[in-house]
Amino acid sequence: MKLMNWLRSEGHCRADGPGWPDALATLLIAALHVAYFTLCLRRGHIDPGVDGEVYRQLARDYLASESFLGEKCRIVFWTPWYVIIALVGATQSGVFLLQLSFFILTLVAIAGAAQQLGLSLFWRLLAITAYGLYWPTFDYVVFYQYENFLAWAVVTTVWLLGREREVLRTRWQRWLVAGAVVGLGVFAHSRVAGVALLGGVILVALSFRSRRPHVKLHAAFWGPVILPTLLWGIRNRLLFGQWILSSTSFGYNFYVGFNPVATGSFMPQPPYPPLDRAAEMALEFIRSHPGRAAELVVWKLVRFWEISRPDQFGPWWLLWQEWILMPLGLVAFMMMLGRVGRSLLRERWPLFPTSAEATLFNLSFVMVYFLAFTAVFYVFTPRFRLPTMPLIVLAGVWCLHEGWRETCKKRGKAPQSELTC
């Protein structure tokens, strides 16, 4: 009885909530990915992907080490994503099962977030299939790289924290799960640190609004967020005598984004800088060429919304999500900013009485963070946008849904079904 009451309170047993159609769509999509993996195996060698070869070798070196510290992994430039790969043996089948599992959980989170946005069955299924059949996911569920894993962490956090203020104030278990998701995501790659910032903003708002510290909620969230990265820092301190919490690539990525030959695109690449001076060299370039630096920022922000070229992810007809949902995602992003701005003026805090408002805030917040991250670090390629694609797909489908509702209103009719008014 307690379990059923909890399920009802969380929305899992609502008549319009995720049910067997969502589960069936998710299983069919997973089956297609299994079929694709099988075909790749029959073809022979599977390309591990860009950077994937490095992470695969680091994972094998970690497994060959004498202790869990990974003494044979002496390179701290790369993020500790390879430790997660090592947990499944760093084999092709093990990595695929790991990636597929988190891909399925990503689809579950998309369905949950879509429900919180008020999308009914048809629109939820559209969101699930739009991301599930997005062609790059087929490769990145096979690759040794981290983009698929980060996509799971991002959209799952948006979903878990996209609830009305009363739920966020009373459900410490939700904060514990969100903290574990964020902690694993940040451990895999610090690029998703912004989702931790989202949780922090909401927790601070809760404390100010209720004038209580909510120590239990803070502990439930920040404990699992900090622990994996802290343990990695201790490991690096023991092995190398330095507190390296993730990797040493921060300065390099900053410099690649701002240097004399930077164009905002992947090529040309600058000469490899000394790692201990890379960030300083980037700042020196920005101070010396502020106009050029501003131009690079604008160029990368614009390119964030561009359609991928066929040589990047495959033929255009396999990327219909980008041709349709990317432009709609940009329109939705602007709409969300307007609605969230009005809600914040009304509520004063990023705490809302409905899940739809809360989820819109979360989507907007995380997308703004990734836009800012793209503008500052490295260069733009569609690969770097992949962790945000579940959010862009959700935003695009939400935009279609809102347009459909507005059309019905203008015709003076209430929606009679999923598609007709």
Image (spheres, grey):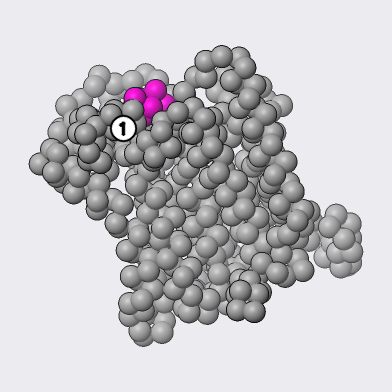
374 in relation to 142, above or below? below
Q: Looking at the rendering, which quadrant does residue 172 occupy?
A: bottom left
Residue 395 visible to an observer of this rendering: no
Looking at the rendered image, the quarter that the N terminus falls into is bottom right
46 in relation to 64, above or below? above
| Residue drawn at point x = 55 percent, y = 60 percent | 159
Q: Nearer the viewer, residue 105 or 261?
A: 105
Q: Is residue 375 magenta?
A: no
Crowd class of label 1 (few under 14; some 14 to 19; many from 20; radius 10 Å): many
Q: Looking at this rendering, what residue extends furthest in the front direction?
A: 66
Q: Looking at the rendering, which quadrant does residue 412 occupy?
A: bottom right
Question: Residue beneath label 1, please?
Answer: 63
The answer to whether 281 appears left or right of 135 in the picture is left
Q: Is residue 53 magenta?
A: yes
Q: Looking at this rendering, what residue extends furthest in the top direction?
A: 44
Looking at the rendered image, the quarter that the C terminus falls into is bottom right
Main secondary-structure element of the magenta-colored stretch: helix
Q: Nearer the viewer, residue 46 or 399?
A: 46
The answer to whether 141 appears left or right of 213 in the picture is right
Percent x, y of residue 308: 58, 28
Percent x, y of residue 177: 46, 62
The answer to whether 296 appears left or right of 398 in the picture is left
> Could you tell me how many numbered marks the image carries?
1
Residue 30 visible to an observer of this rendering: yes
| Residue drawn at point x = 43 percent, y = 24 percent | 50
Region rendered in magenta: 52-58
Percent x, y of residue 43: 61, 14
Q: Amino acid at mark 1?
A: Leu
Percent x, y of residue 311: 57, 19
Task: Tell me the element at label 1.
Answer: helix
Q: Nearer the viewer, residue 32 or 418?
A: 32
